[in-house]
Amino acid sequence: MIYEPLFKLERTGVQIHYYTNIRKYNPVHWHSAVELIYILNGNAKISIEGKDYPVVAGEFVVIDSNLLHEFCCRGESMMVVIHFSRSSMKNFIPNLDEYHFQCARAELQKENLGAYLEICELLKGLPPLYVMHPTGYKLKSQAIAMEIFFELVNQFAEAGEWVQKPEKRENLERLEEIIEYIELHHKEQISLESIAAHFYLSREYFSRFFRKNMGVTFTRYVNQVRLMHIYQEICNTEFGIMELAEKHGFTNYKLFNKMFHEVYGCTPREIRMSRKRS
C-alpha cells in the first residue's frame, strides 16, 4: 500500500516499527502522521517533496504529515520508524496545527545540534526494549516516543499553519485514488490512455497532473511499484525471476533488469543468492 492510513495509530497516538532489511525501497507515498526514521545500521536516501536527504547510521530525519516521500536503502540496514498521529497529539498540544516539522542532519543549524543529539540518545533506548522485552516494555517505549515528540515540538517545529490549502488536499485525495488503482492493477498493462480514461481525464492532463504532484512520470512510477512487489517475491518465494517479472507486468526484461539495478544496486539473481546464503 503506497498511501498509509495507519488506522491503529489513531487509537494509540504513537506507532513504533523496527526493520531489518538487506535492501529496502518504498516508492513515493504519504500519510497523515508525522514520521521519524532513525537509521541504526547502514545508510539510506530519503527524498521529501523531491529533495534528497542522505541518512547514515546514528542519524534520523522527520517527515511532516502528507509530504510526498520516497525511501531507498541499497545495503544491509536496521532502522526504527515512529509515526505520531497529529490528531492524537492535539489532545496534549491543542495548537499543534500552528506548527510544521522539519528536521534532517544535512540541514541542521549548529545551534540545534545538541537537541538533535539528545533525541538520538533517546532513540538508542528503543531497540534494547524491543529485544529484551522486559515487563512493561511497550509502556516504556511509548514514554520514550512521547518524550521524543516533546523535543521535536520544542526544538524542531516551525511556526506556520500546517492546515493544507484546499487545492493540495484535493490533489492528494485524487492521487490516493490513482495510487490505489495502480496498486490493484500493476500486474496488468496499464497505459496512460486507459488510466486517464478511467478517471475521466484527458491523457495530457493526467500526465501533467501525475508528474507535477508525484515528481515522477506515470510509467516510471508503475514500474517502481512492480519492482517493489517483485523484490518481495524474490526474497520470499522460489518462483523464477523472469516469471516474477512477467507476473507483475514487465514485458521488457532488459528494462526490468536495468531498473532493478538502479533501485537496488544489484541484479535480481544476486538478491536471490544472498537470501539463500542467509
Image: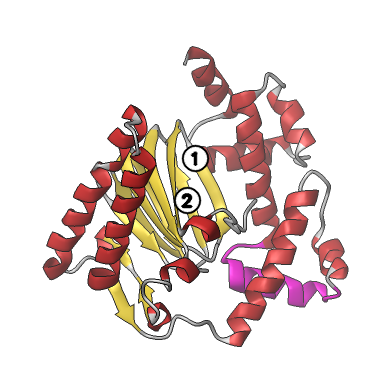
Lateral position of residue 195 relative to residue 71, left or right: right
Q: Name the amino acid type tagged 2.
A: Phe
Kindly give the residue lying farthest to the top in the view shown. 277
- Label 2 or label 1, whichever comes before in sequence order: 1
- With 29 as the anchor, is 223 left or right in this view? right
Q: Main secondary structure of the magenta part?
A: helix
Residue located 71% across and 21% down the image: 240
Q: Nearer the viewer, residue 258 or 198?
A: 198
Q: Is residue 147 above or below residue 186?
A: below
Look at mark 1 in the image and give the residue it sits on: 24
User: Residue 149's mark?
Assistant: none
Extent of the magenta region: 200-217
The 10 Å Cα crowd at callout 1, few under 14, some 14 to 19, many 20 or more, is many
Quarter where residue 210 is shown: bottom right
* One can see residue 49 in this view: no
The picture quadrant where one finds residue 35 is bottom left
Q: Which residue is mark 2?
A: 71
User: SS for tag 1?
Assistant: strand
User: What type is the residue that disc 1 sits on?
Assistant: Lys
Picture coordinates of residue 6, whole percent (x, y)? 57, 55
